[in-house]
């Protein structure tokens, strides 16, 4: 095992395009770090530079105490697990898992010992003599992981290893990957486009956009204290709701009504009086006003005409529309909309759709006007020009310096889909 250090790592192609721009990140020995972001953000390129499959244009890469910029992939003591399983169809599971050791000239008895130990960890013992064509997708992915495990590398690099699996199997394999990594304690860097995978798997998550590292922290740090509009919109499902906002004194005026800001938040908003900002509210920070109880004074109530209700048993999603005379323009919001395939910027026009996650005991009904409540302490305000979160006390450089991140002991529990 080893620490992996990226010091201003840059990848520039001959045409001048920079896929990764001065990326600095330290992955501690035994840590599980996730690189997440939309397609084309540079996460896979960064992983391939660590593996030695892409040349490094500028910066320094260290594995342990050794600079490995010019070392061949085979000399870096890392093992990769790819999106496609890359198994030899004519070989048994046993032979696939032990093939790299065989190429090294490892003694057959030692190969058998390592393969059987890996098969025990991965619950593949009964499949060792079968061929890949006779296995399920999840079993094949475990074989690919087993091939990496038997090498006992300093680090695992995983490039979207679960993306070829169906939804149910992906959930199961997420649990398996997490369990295996914790049992082995091997330094792991895992690339994914799926923010739910990022939230459930990693010790820390590094969010990338357009080749730049946006924020690094524990899943709940990113969820509760996003540094900018992009991180706020990318992390979380359903996504954060965005709407135009104007600060007047201690109040922020939103399309849903006026919300009184907590003193600590208002103190960070100097110079924004009268300026149009972007407000962000997560779905779970709304509630049926009749169910709020003692927390009612912490927020504000407003009327909402419920258009769609989605009941998931343990949760209730209420969809409604709010009208606004203001429009919000943001490159980050455009990128987020394009990434999910909608091509529509939230609240860009006169009407915007909002989704609220309500207690399943709520008696709101489709087609009726209901009284909802929003938690004022959880409203985020962003500068539309540079996307900065104006309501968080986190500092930008400290959050992306790649240092070891700690979990926020007072963080609210994650929503159900990110547990």
Image: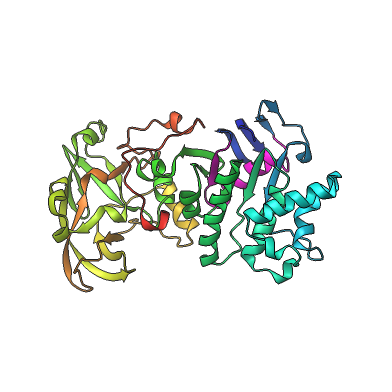
Q: Locate residue 265 relative to residue 335 in the image: left or right.
A: left
> Residue 363: x, y in percent?
18, 69
Q: Nearer the viewer, residue 321 or 111?
A: 111
Residue 82 in sight: no
Q: Quadrant of residue 241?
A: bottom left
In the image, which residues are magenta?
Answer: 30-56
- In the image, 110 versus 208, the foreground residue is 110
The residue that appears at 70% across and 41% down in the rendered structure is: 153
Q: In the picture shown, does residue 129 fall above or below 336? A: below
Left or right? Give the position of 349 relative to 290.
right
Q: Position of residue 152 (x, y in %)?
A: 70, 42
Of 121 and 381, the residue lying toward us: 121
Residue farthest along the top direction in this orientation: 65
Left or right of residue 313: residue 42: right
Q: In which image quadrant can residue 322 be found?
A: bottom left
User: Is 47 inside the magenta-drawn segment?
Assistant: yes
- Coordinates of residue 25 in the picture (x, y in percent): 56, 33
From the viewer's perspective, is residue 96 above or below residue 42? Answer: below
Residue 349 drawn in magenta: no
Q: Residue at x 21, y 41 (%)?
A: 247
Q: In this rendering, does residue 409 appear at all?
A: yes
Q: What's the residue at 18%, 72% (across, down)? A: 368
Question: On screen, 165 above or below 187?
Answer: below
**Horizontal and vertical percent position of residue 198:** 49, 49
Which quarter of the picture shows residue 131? bottom right
- Camera-nearest residue between 107 and 349: 107
- Is 353 positioned to the left or the right of 172 in the image? left
Residue at point 67% right, 37% down? 154
Q: Farthest residue to the bottom: give it.
A: 367
Q: Image quadrant for the N terminus?
A: top right
């Amino acid at each position: 095992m080893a620490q992996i250090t990226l010091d201003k790592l840059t990848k520039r192609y001959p045409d001048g395009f920079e896929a990764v721009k001065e990326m600095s990140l330290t992955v501690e020995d035994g840590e599980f770090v996730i690189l997440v972001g939309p397609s084309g953000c540079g996460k896979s390129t960064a992983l391939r530079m660590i593996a030695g499959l892409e040349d490094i244009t500028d910066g320094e890469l260290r594995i342990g105490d050794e600079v490995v910029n010019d070392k061949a992939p085979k000399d870096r003591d890392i093992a990769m697990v790819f999106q496609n399983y890359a198994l030899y169809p004519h070989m048994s599971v046993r032979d696939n898992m032990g093939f790299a050791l065989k190429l090294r000239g490892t003694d057959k008895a030692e190969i058998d010992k390592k393969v059987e130990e890996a098969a025990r960890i991965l619950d593949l013992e009964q499949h060792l003599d079968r061929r890949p064509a006779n296995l399920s997708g999840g079993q094949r992915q475990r074989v690919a992981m087993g091939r990496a495990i038997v090498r006992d590398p300093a680090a695992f690099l995983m490039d979207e290893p679960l993306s070829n699996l169906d939804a149910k199997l992906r959930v199961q394999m997420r649990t398996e990957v997490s369990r295996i990594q914790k049992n082995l304690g091997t330094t792991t860097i895992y690339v994914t486009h799926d923010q739910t995978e990022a939230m459930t798997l990693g010790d820390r998550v590094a969010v990338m956009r357009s080749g730049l590292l946006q924020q690094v922290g524990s899943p709940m740090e990113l969820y509760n204290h996003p540094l900018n509009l992009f991180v706020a919109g990318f992390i979380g499902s359903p996504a954060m709701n965005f709407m135009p906002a104007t600060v007047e004194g201690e109040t922020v005026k939103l399309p849903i009504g006026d919300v009184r800001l907590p003193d600590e938040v208002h103190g960070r908003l100097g110079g924004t009086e009268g300026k149009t900002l972007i407000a962000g509210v997560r779905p779970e920070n709304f509630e049926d006003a009749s169910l709020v109880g003692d927390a009612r004074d912490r927020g504000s109530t407003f009327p909402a005409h419920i258009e769609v209700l989605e009941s998931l048993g343990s949760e209730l999603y209420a969809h409604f529309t709010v009208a606004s005379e203001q429009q919000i323009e943001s490159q980050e919001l455009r990128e987020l909309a394009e990434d999910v395939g909608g091509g529509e910027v939230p609240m860009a026009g006169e009407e915007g759709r909002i989704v609220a996650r309500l207690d399943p005991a709520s008696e709101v009904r489709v087609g009726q006007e209901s009284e909802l409540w929003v938690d004022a302490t959880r409203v985020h305000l962003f500068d539309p020009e540079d996307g900065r979160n104006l309501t968080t006390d986190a500092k930008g450089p400290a959050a992306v310096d790649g240092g070891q991140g700690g979990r926020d002991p007072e963080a609210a529990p994650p929503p159900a889909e990110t547990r």
